[in-house]
Image (cartoon, rainbow, N blue to C red):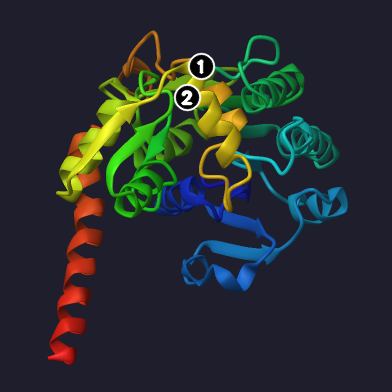
Amino acid sequence: MKRRICILGGTGFVGHHVISSLAREGHSIRVLTRRREEHRELLVMPTVEVFDANVHDESSLNRFFADQDAVINLVGILNERHDNGKGFYHAHVELSDKVIRTCRTHGIERLLHMSALNADPGTGSSYYLRSKGEAEHRVHAAGDLNVTSFRPSVIFGPEDSFINRFASLLKKTPWLFPLACANARFAPVYVRDVADAFSQSLNDPNTYGQRYNLCGPHEYTLQEVVERIIETLDIRRRVIPLGRLGSALQANLLEYAPGKPFSRDNYRSLQMDSICPEGDQVLREVFGIEPAALEAIMPQYLRHETWRTRYQLFRSKARRD
């Protein structure tokens, strides 16, 4: 069944892939963003409309939710301006409350919600995880909505903010690379697998009310991930794992660095391993997806960047000669 879907957070890394997956199925998609003209790659898709809107403005939600069949909320932030939880609460919990109210106003019963592995309002180790857990709890408590939430481990793929961030830092850091929380464990999941799970669940009543942990086929420590990036980039770096005190100190220092490459709340999140007790079972058994492994996909986009950088360097040297 073809649906009319309004997507919040559709211009982000995961959003682009969710939109592509839904568009292939022929659904009509409405994307809300603050900067429409910056996303021309979406404007050319035949079943996609992009509108300027502030998703935190409930009047805007009312305008754009009208005549829709379903809503997908992908909005999430990994850092906030101040380390007090208010930014996370605003982005995750308050927005979810507005989505619930607006869905009710327009009789929209289907809601897909992006949460996070370890999200829990009581036991989450960080503001991020507690706010994600509270938002997840509230959308599922709305008994008049058919909600499916997804709780992925760290998501990887081209343009991700995980692998690419470490790759960028490694290129800038000579010889020794001090790594906080090196023993934190992850089960990285491929962005297209996550997107396909969203798409498949949309019209499947069996997924109503479910909360799905999404993990890739292999588990890694953070140090193992970073060492794979080093190997892929073919650079010489030695990873220096930091203990608890050194990790906390690095988080406190980088909390105030431009772009917050690592924050105190990131440090707190890393105190919980981001792995699924059931492994990659959900993707395989619920959605029939053969999950892609990190080592199969990561070289494709990191090496492409490396080759392009080397080619540009070669051209610049050739012009000087």
The residue positioned 46% from the left and 68% from the top of the image is 41
- Mark 1, secondary structure of its residue: loop
**Which is closer to the viewer, label 1 or label 2?**
2
> At which x and y percent is residue 92?
71, 34
| Amino acid type for the residue under numbered disc 1 | Gln
How would you rate the neighbour count of disc 2 (Cα within 10 Å): few for under 14, some for 14-19, many for 20 or more? Answer: some
The residue positioned 65% from the left and 33% from the top of the image is 110
| Amino acid type for the residue under numbered disc 2 | Gly
Q: Is residue 202 above or below residue 259?
A: above
> At which x and y percent is residue 23?
45, 54
Decide if residue 253 is in sight here: yes
The residue positioned 82% from the left and 41% from the top of the image is 102
> 237 and 131: which one is in front?
237
Q: Which mark is residue 246?
A: 2
Quadrant of the image occupied by residue 162: top left
> 16 and 308: which one is in front?
308
89 left or right of 166 in image = right
Q: Which residue is mark 1?
A: 271
Gap in Å between the C-alphas at discs 1 and 2? 14 Å
Q: Which mark is residue 125?
A: none
Q: Is residue 113 above or below residue 245?
A: below
